[in-house]
Image (cartoon, rainbow, N blue to C red):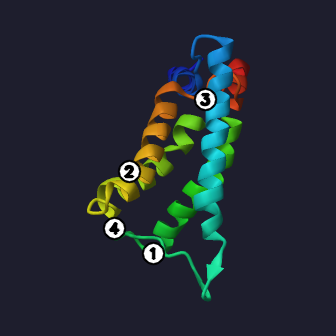
Amino acid sequence: MPFNRIIMIEILKQLLYSDVGSNLNNWALLIFRILLALELFRVHGMKKFRVQNGQREHVPNPLGLPDKLNGLVATFSDTVVPFLLMLGIGTRLVILPTIGVTAIGYFVVHRKDSVEVRDVPYMYTLSLLFILALGAGTISLDHYLLNLL
């Protein structure tokens, strides 16, 4: 097997492997992923489709990215990522843009707001960092794909 292919397989194993120790813990992680993803989509993703007063939701752009790119990242993070998170597919990679969006919301967009306003992006960021560290667990498509390797 060529050296590059071995390295790629090892990287994939590191990204996909996740086992939080017991069957109960893996089920708890699945439930946590599903509930977090449902709330992210229900509260933030659905806003991307609503039109109020003839306009869609305004997405802040504190980094000065091109407007279309900024909107695409925010929409992807709030609409597509939750479904991938529920399935547990590519979990550690797919949540990175959402971590970016929520962390920027906390540290930049809402930095001067009250604690009550800052709480939402703070809790999402912490929850997503928790999943980034643990992975999706054994009840996920990541685990299934890892077993195929």
**Residue type, label 1:** Asp
**Residue type, label 4:** Pro
Gap in Å between the C-alphas at discs 4 and 2?
Answer: 12 Å
Depth check, front residue: 125 or 2: 125
Residue 72: quarter of image: bottom right
Q: Secondary structure at mark 4?
A: loop
Image x and y of residue 35, in percent: 65, 41
Q: Residue furthest top?
A: 22
Q: What residue is shown with label 1?
A: 67
Residue at figure coordinates x 33%, y 61% from the top left:
110
Name the front one of labels 3 and 1. 3
Name the front one of labels 1 and 4. 4
Marking on residue 136: 3
Q: What residue is shown with label 2?
A: 103
Q: Residues within 10 Å of mark 1 (few under 14, many from 20)?
A: few
Q: What residue is shown with label 4?
A: 62
Q: Residues within 10 Å of mark 3 (few under 14, many from 20)?
A: many
Residue 34: quarter of image: top right
Q: Residues within 10 Å of mark 2 (few under 14, many from 20)?
A: some
Gap in Å between the C-alphas at discs 3 and 1?
Answer: 32 Å
Lower sequence index among marks 1 and 4: 4
